[in-house]
Image: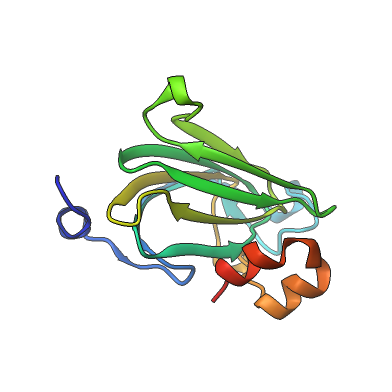
Amino acid sequence: MKDANGWIEALALQPHPEGGFFRETYRSEEVIFQDSLPDRFAGERSFSTAIYYLLEGNDFSAFHRIHQDEVWHFYDGASLTIHVISPDGSYSAAVLGRNILKGQAPQFVVPGGCLFAVEVNDRSSFVLAGCTVAPGFDFADFEMPSAKQLLDSFPQHKALIERLTR
């Protein structure tokens, strides 16, 4: 596939609230009951879920967080940067892509409870990735704070927050 539109059509991807396009590809039929999960979960969750996720070069995944760890998998296109702000305000970033010799990785885990945003490193390209979440993703676990909320908590990351929020 040579462009984002080809992947979007071939994989039947739909717009995602944080930006980009996605389609859930797996949701475990088995569940973890609420009484076996940490208190941060309000209900049962599937064992695991997985999605395809595509970002076009001029788009971004806005800062958001979920309760679970999220494993990112690189599939195709340009490399991407995952920007992470931990609850204590520390910043880190990871670059996913094919070029291992230049520090890129094919996978990265965003720890649960951390804020993160994603952007394509080549604005003229796209990235196709996958995300796996365990316990499985539920929109009840999803939070996408406003720029004001993030700036009130993390003013030291002003430029990044203003660039990667909606």
Residue 26, image x, y percentages: 38, 47
In the figure, is residue 104 to the left or right of 145? left
Residue lying at 64% horizontally and 58% vertically, measured from the top left: 66
Q: Quadrant of residue 117?
A: bottom right
- Which residue is at the front of the view, 113 or 147? 147
Residue 13, image x, y percentages: 27, 61
Residue 88, image x, y percentages: 85, 52
State whether residue 29 appears in this view: no
Residue lying at 54% horizontally and 35% vertically, measured from the top left: 108
Q: Which quadrant would the C terminus be assigned to in this image?
A: bottom right
In the figure, is residue 65 to the left or right of 10? right
In the figure, is residue 68 to the left or right of 137? right
Residue 136, placed above or below residue 9: above
Total marks placed: 0
Residue 107, image x, y percentages: 49, 32
Residue lying at 51% horizontally and 26% vertically, measured from the top left: 103
State whether residue 2 appears in this view: yes
Residue 161, placed above or below residue 69: below
Q: Which quadrant would the N terminus be assigned to in this image?
A: top left
